[in-house]
Image (cartoon, grey):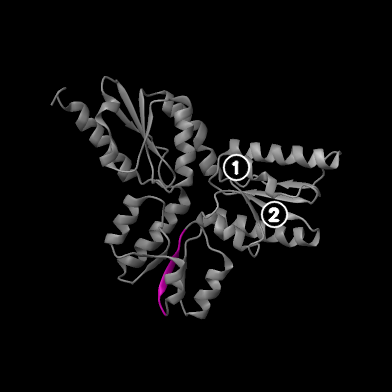
Amino acid sequence: MNVTVDSDSGFCFGVVFAIEMAESQLDAGHELYCLGDIVHNNMEVDRLKAKGLKIINHEEFNELRDCKVLIRAHGEPPETYQTAIRNNIELIDASCPVVLKLQNRVRTSMNTAEEEQGQVVIYGEAGHAEVNGLVGQTNGKAIIITGEQDIEKIDFKKPVYLFSQTTKSTKGFQRIQDLIKERIIAEKGEDLTMADFNANDTICRQVSNREPQLKKFAVQHDVIIFVSGKKSSNGKVLYNVCRSVNPRTHFVSDLEEINPDWIQGVDSAGVCGATSTPMWLMDQVAEKLRGIASEPQGA
């Protein structure tokens, strides 16, 4: 059986940057805390924990003093920076530049929306670290839309500024955008202007560009093993992309979840993953598949 690892899968540049910053501090012997999992992949988190990285939550962060704390790629709300100043915490800021740009756009739009009695709407997962950071730019006033069922939260009589979490699907964003547009038109009974509806596709292109590539990769193999942490929003999106063109797509977080029955009697298997999946883990999955395939049947 031929096993191929997708060379275009693996960490996006934002995750690479955050991990490099963490390892630089740890290799220099510094004590380093990280506010939340540095990446939504438990295997990579465990690897960095073994090097000395200490994962903390926001409650623990508020109690720290005189230390170094890494801000991961997802970004943080303004309150985090205010706490750091108050508690003399040195922040190692690895916020993704794409996320920082989005935070600035959300903050600016919120200022405009308040002047116009409008509203900022974020298409994303409630409670996700990136979304928390975005909502923080609006003093908690942004409306979070996780799916079609949530659009009733919006007042369609007022101006709407729509943004997206950077790791959502382009198809999902387009659907939400169309639904909001239809409702505003139905409410106002006239053509839309930018003053009524300002839609901003803020999905990271390094994420969205992987969708067509993954579709090509998935159809080239009999079976797809998609490797991702269960917490990864991007992982859920890209897994469904693979599954949409290859029903024999299986989601695993580690080697123990691989079922040998998945590859019985197949000629080729493809291994791919999310932007939060380390290449070394995908390589390990591929090696395990090769090992299973090389075993005599019935062994």
Report which residue position mark 2 lands on. Answer: 120
Relative image position of residue 112 (x, y in whole percent) = 76, 59
Report which residue position mark 1 lands on. Answer: 147
Residue depth check, mark 1 versus mark 2: number of the one nearer the observer? 1
User: Taking 158 as reference, is 265 left or right?
Assistant: left
Structural crowding at the residue carrying mark 1, measured as other residues with C-alpha within 10 Å and reported as few (<14), some (14–19) or many (≥20): some
Pick the front one: 217 or 43: 43
Q: Secondary structure at mark 2?
A: strand
Q: Amino acid at mark 2?
A: Val
Q: Classify residue 268 by image quadrant.
A: top left
Relative image position of residue 94 (x, y in whole percent) = 47, 61
Relative image position of residue 233 (x, y in whole percent) = 48, 46
Residue occupying the point 71% across, 59% down: 110
- Magenta stretch? 66-72
User: Taking 82 as reference, is 270 left or right?
Assistant: left
Q: Amino acid at mark 1?
A: Gly
Check if residue 193 falls in the magenta segment.
no
Check if residue 69 falls in the magenta segment.
yes
